[in-house]
Image: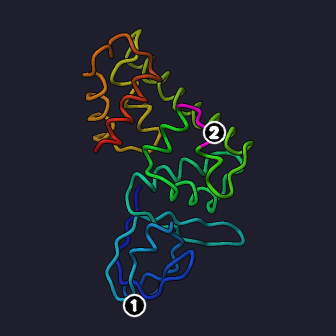
Amino acid sequence: MIASVEGTVGAVAADSLVLEVGGIGYRVFAAPAVLSVARPGSTLKLHTHHLVREDLQALYGFRSADELGFFELLLTVTGVGPKVALAIVGSRPVPDLQLAIIEQDQAMLVSIPGIGKKLAERIIFELKEKVAAAGVAARSAGGTGGAGEGEVVAALQALGYSLAEARDASRAALAEPGAGEASLEERVKAALRTLLRD
């Protein structure tokens, strides 16, 4: 379930903002791209993740459902907490980050503050595994031998895209020349490239 909150910006700090909803102010941690456009008194809509732990409750806000979905996917990686996941999501557009993970581009991840080589390797390894598992599940359900549309859609959904976005990107990738012989990984990369162009 995606929770979105719309309210009035009460204040903006270095790493968070106060969003006033129904007379109550909520502190929401957000990426610099969100904070840079937030002005006190303006109306802002954010997709939020509510983190609840024994010693902490915190809200994390994002411009889009894609960013929120990718943030939540990053939280499943061992050693990635909300601050690191927020730094990753806030560093580049989500399709760029997903393509870097699929292409095992450690350099891009290491360039993000707070990400070392070992953590970059773990992120790539664990998220590639999730995409591969989604592709296997789609193949066994569909009974097809090659990497068909269902596998690509499942892989994109595992990366946090909505069903409609995943279908559109998959169809665009399958329409490209030579797509019939492409592997699942190649088709997912092609679909991510179409999402980057949008």
Q: How many marks?
A: 2
The residue drawn where x is 34% and y is 75% is: 44
Going by the numbered disc 1, the residue's amino acid type is Gly
Q: Secondary structure at mark 1?
A: loop
Which callout, 1 or 2, points to the residue nearer the camera?
A: 2
Q: Does 163 sit left or right of 189 as displayed?
A: left
| 164, above or below 74, in the image | above
In the image shown, does 48 or 120 lie closer to the viewer?
120
Residue that numbered label 2 is attached to: 106
The residue drawn where x is 61% and y is 72% is: 57
Residues at marks 1 and 2, CA–CA distance in whole angstroms: 45 Å
Q: Does 51 sit left or right of 150 as displayed?
A: right
In the image shown, does 101 or 151 lie closer to the viewer?
101
Label 2 environment density (alpha carbons within 10 Å; few <14, some 14–19, many ≥20): some
Q: Magenta segment range?
A: 103-107
Going by the numbered disc 2, the residue's amino acid type is Gln
The image quadrant where one finds the C terminus is: top left
Residue that numbered label 1 is attached to: 23
Q: Position of residue 172 (x, y in %)?
A: 26, 29
The image quadrant where one finds the N terminus is: bottom left
Label 1 environment density (alpha carbons within 10 Å; few <14, some 14–19, many ≥20): few
Q: Which badge, 1 or 2, comes first in the chain's sequence?
A: 1
